[in-house]
Structures are given as C-alpha cells and as structure tokens.
Amino acid sequence: MTAPAAAGALAHVCMRATGLDLSHDKPSARMRYDEGTGIILFTEGQQVQAYSTSPSATTQQPLWVASPGEGDPIASLSVSLDGAILAVQRGTAFLQFVHLKSSKLFVQGPKSRTRILSFFWCPSEGCDFVMATGQGLELYQRLPQGQGLRYKGSRKHPTTWCTYSHESRIVLLATGQGGLWLQAYQVTNDAVLKLPPFQLGPSASQQASPKSGPSQRVSPQDIRILTIYCRIYCAHIDHPHKRLVLYRFFKDAVVLQHTYEIYSRSIELSVHDNVLLVHHLDSSTVLLLDVRARTNGPIVGPLPLAIALENQDDQSVPASIHASMREDHLEREGRVEVASSSSAAASTSGSISTASGGPDHLDSCHWSFQPPNLILDTQACKVWRCEVDIAAVGRTCTDWPLLLAILQRRHPLLHPTCDIKALLLAIVKGALLEQLNMCTVKQIFDACALGYAEACAAPPSPHQGIIPSSPESRGRALRLAAPALAPQEVELKVLRWLHEEEATGVQYLEAAIAQYLASCSWQGIAVPAGLRLLSIDVALLRGHKHQVVSSLHQQGGGWDSGALAAHLERLARKGELAEAWQLALDMYARLGMHDKHCQMLLAKGKVVQALRCAQEHQVQTIAPDSFLVKGAETGDVQVFSAIYRVCQQAAQPRIEPYNTCKQRFEKVLQSAAAKA
C-alpha cells in the first residue's frame, strides 16, 4: 500500500465533502445510496432513514423515517421516483412495499415464482416498477392509491445476474455459463426497448453462441453502465488482461469503441464533467480518460486522490489521514503555469483552494463508489463527491493540442475556481510565444476551430431514452456555456496582441495567422474582418504586396467587408499598396456601399464617374457642393455646367441658380484652367 499524497501536493482529482456527516449519529448503521432519487438510506435494526445529498440541503435531519417491520435482515432498498413508496428486499422470493406517509405495507412476489435478482423503479408510461428474475424482466404498474402492483408483461430472457443504471435507463441481463453474453433493455418514457445482444471479450462475435463455454467469468462487479457526452457505454473491467473496455450502445448495434490499459486488479469508476475517472484502489491513484480524445491513453499521468478542504480547520477529513496533513494546505490562487518545455505561463483563476493528502485505504470494503461521482464512507457515515481539478490538469499536461481540446469540452459551471477561457488563451498564446513548430500550431488551431464549431452547432435533445441508430449517427454532446475560443478572441487577445507587442517574429506570425485562417475555413467558420486586416498588415510588413493582391483577387468577394474596404482605402491613401484603390472600389461596389464608392471616386478626381454612380444608385448622402467643387477643379466649364444640371435635377431642395453658382466657383475654375 502506497502512502497518501503529501499535504498540499498537486492532485488531478479531489474528494469534496457533500456536507452529510452522520458519523456521530449513526455509528452502527448500514449506509446505502438510492440512484433513482439521489438520497442516502441508513438502516439500523428495522428502521430506515433517508438523507439528502443535495448541496442545497441545509440540515442533516432525515427526510423521512420508515419502519418496514420485523423480519430477516434488509438486503436491498429502493425508493419510488416520487418518494412515496419504499421497496424492501429481505430474501429472493418476494418484496415488501411500505407507504412512507401512511406506513401501510403490502407484499409482491414475481409472477414467474423464481428468485429475484434485482428490482428498480422507472419513469416509463404504463410501467412503474421492474423486477429482474432468473427468467428475465417483469413489468409492473402501481395500482391507484398505491395498494399494490399490477402485472403488465415480461421480457423473457434466461438471466444469471443483472445491473441497472437509472441515469441511462439501461438494464443489462447476463446469460451463459460465464456471464459473457449480455442483453440490454432501455426503459424509455413510453416503451421498453430491446437492444442487440453482445458478447464481452476480444474475439466477441454477435454470431457466436451464448451456450459456448467461456474462458473467463464476468460478475456484475466487473460491469458499469456509464453516460459520457450523452453517449451510453458498457464498461467492462477486464481484470485478467488488466484493461478497461468500453462498448457503446446503439439501437441496432453494440460497438467496442475504446480499450484502455489499467494497472491494478482493484478498480472503480467515476464520471465528472464527462471525464472518466479510473480509481486504482490499491495505490489510491486516479487515471483521467476522455473518450473523445485522439488518444487511447490517459489525459495526464496518474496522481493520488486528494481531499478538497474549504478551510484550514475543516474537520471532515477521514481519520486515516494524519493530523498534520489536515493542518497544512496549499492556496492555489492567481497565477497558473501551463505545462511546457520552458517558462511559458498563464495567468488565470486558481484550482481548488485547499487540498490534503487523500485516503490511503480506498481498497477497504467500507468505501463504496456510486454513480456518477459519489464516494460513500460507510464506516464513517460520510458522503464525498469526486471532482476534477481542471487547473491542475492544465499545469501537468504537456500535450498542448490535446489539453486545449479537452478544456474546450469542459463545463465552466462545474469548475468555478478555474477560468477555463483564460487558460485556453494562455495555451494558444504560450504556444506562439515559444514558437512551436507549425505542425503543433496546426493541431492547436484545429482544436480551437473544432471546439468553436461544435459550440455553435445546435445541441441535440437530452439523451434519455434515445440511442443513435448506428455508429455513423454522430450526435454532438449537449454543450451549455461551452468555453470555446471565438475567432474574435483569438484575433484580439492572441494574434493582434503578439503583433502589437512585437512578441514574436513577423515571419512566424504570418505563418500562424495563415494556419488559423485555414483551420477556420476547414470548419466553415466565418472569420472576423479584423483578422483579415491583420493578415494583410503582417504580409505587407514582410513586403508581400503581390501576395496580398493575389489573395484578394482569388477570394472573389469572399472576404468582402466594410472594414476591409476602408482598410484598403487607408492603405491606398498612405501609398502602401497602389492596387488598394481599385480593390477598395470594387469591394464597395460589391457590398452596395455606393456612397463610399462615390466618395472614393471623388477623392481620385473622377467626378463624372462618381456623379454617374450617385445618379444610378440614388445616393442622397453626398452634398451637391462635393461634386461641384470637383467639377470646378477640372477647369472645364462644360464639365462644371453638366454637373450643375444633374445636381439641380436631383437635389432637394433645389440648388441656387446657375449664374450664382458659377460665380461662387469662378476662382476655382480659373485657377484650375491656369494650371492646365
């Protein structure tokens, strides 16, 4: 057994107390967790008490107390989803049902008269309760006033053992000599769906016979039903081969999708914010896995589980942790370093403020792991919640593209102590400051673009009762308030900052901008006009005028924007790009910004073309004097007279008489004629 982590040591996963601590009140009670209602059940003698695990619970008083009566020791408990009835199992022949308000009791046994393997409450229409027996599933509906259960049908299937997940509404029935053949049913809101059977093992085949003798045996302790990114998986902890195998459920297939290496024969699983936590109980270390990562390895190296403390005097640390570890703590606030080969750092919010060494006896029988991320200390009667310290992950992960992709898939509300957006910006900025090779920069920008595209995509409906029909149905996970980097943020806070601060070479910055533009184009993301302007400015600094002109011509209007046209106009006025005059004129024309088009023509002295454009497109925003001044500057009285006639007809109110107008511009006409 390895020693626990030192106090204040870095940890990727922490146990945070839920506030439920009955160690003084329930020294001899047995502790259970009801997944359907999310409450803790204590049995002491023939009495059952229920407690809430909700963070909003402000008291440790029981929600209710029930007395099922005298009999054999209680083996299992389950509370109806509306909290009205308690189901009690003492043996394998029948169940007791207790009304929590009236304390009335009735008894129900399986219609098949076979032993009861498991039971659970469900929210399906016409089916409130399911018994799993050796012959399959039996479906029941509560009678009015809850006076009993009405038999509604069955799903025949020879069963060795079964397991149920309320989160996904999946029940797995094992059959065969070793329990390697599994049959899944999903209890949806209006039906009980039968999914395809599948076999566990590397050589599994749907055509193989479930009657064939297996080389290994599988128990319900080896199987977990997980919901990650709205996808439902069957996790098989393969102890003989030291691997974790994930099978994904579809309506028409069950597909082996992931295989991970594990390093212990004592394993438990948790899920927090769609990160799969693999607890190695004998070493108290945790592997972090992301099923959407581009690698089948862990996100970061394993570290021991730690205890998250709210303050230095927190007394909820298990007694197995040394007192000195409770007193010492590390405040992780302010500056957070991003793992790198040199000194790049990111300034962002800190990780969990205080941490101590974790428990060193997780492989003891009194630690119970419950879905999705609860840990019950049944000996001390305390409840903990596993949480990923995403800031600590950011400090230790050296694969920047992988880290950036992973951070973008996290929910900010589940990590209140870490500014994920600031950490993302720090990663991108740090990569460019270190001038990583363009292959790595491409991976980083591809991850940025993909994350933003997914965040902008319409989210699907919640997954309950819905499984995609095939592996090709690539549904996107429900992402609320995703911390993806928008192109405007990358432009303003990274690329433009690097340009203004001259923090990196112009040649490297030009390549980085081109790569980000390519990544956005790959995902079909609209690029902000400011990024186009920046790319032009950087290219001109490099003396690539021909490249700028060629790129604008090749886009054929794809980059058109008022800001870009105005920028080209400024470049033309400064004489930095001669071709910018015509490029800006064409862009204004394509955008329908005819007033700007006319003003540019006037600025170039092309008064006739400007007047023709204004007349054709009925431009009313340019004063007649602007045209008359430019007409007078030609020194040609005929041109001036023609411009006057057009302005007189179009202007409202009418302009002054011709002779008066000509007299006002006489000096300009004479001066221009003299110069000519």
Image: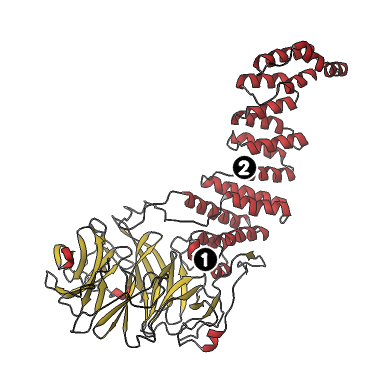
* Residue at which label 2 appears: 529
Q: Is residue 59 above or below residue 275?
A: below
x, y (%) of residue 68? 21, 79
Q: Nearer the viewer, residue 335 or 651?
A: 651
Query: Which secondary structure lies at badge 2?
Result: helix
Please rate how many residues cluster around mark 1, counting C-alpha atoms within 10 Å: few if below 14, some from 14 to 19, many from 20: few
Rendering quarter of residue 143:
bottom left
What type is the residue that disc 2 sits on? Ala
**Which residue is painted at 76% across and 18% down in the image?**
631
Q: Which label sits on residue 416? A: 1
Q: Is residue 100 above or below residue 463?
A: below
x, y (%) of residue 179? 25, 72
- The mark lying in front, picked from 2 and 1, is 1
**Quadrant (top left/top right/bottom left/bottom right) for the C terminus:** top right
Rendering quarter of residue 589:
top right
What type is the residue that disc 1 sits on? Pro
Please rate how many residues cluster around mark 2, counting C-alpha atoms within 10 Å: few if below 14, some from 14 to 19, many from 20: some
Residue 508 visible in this rendered orientation of the protein: no
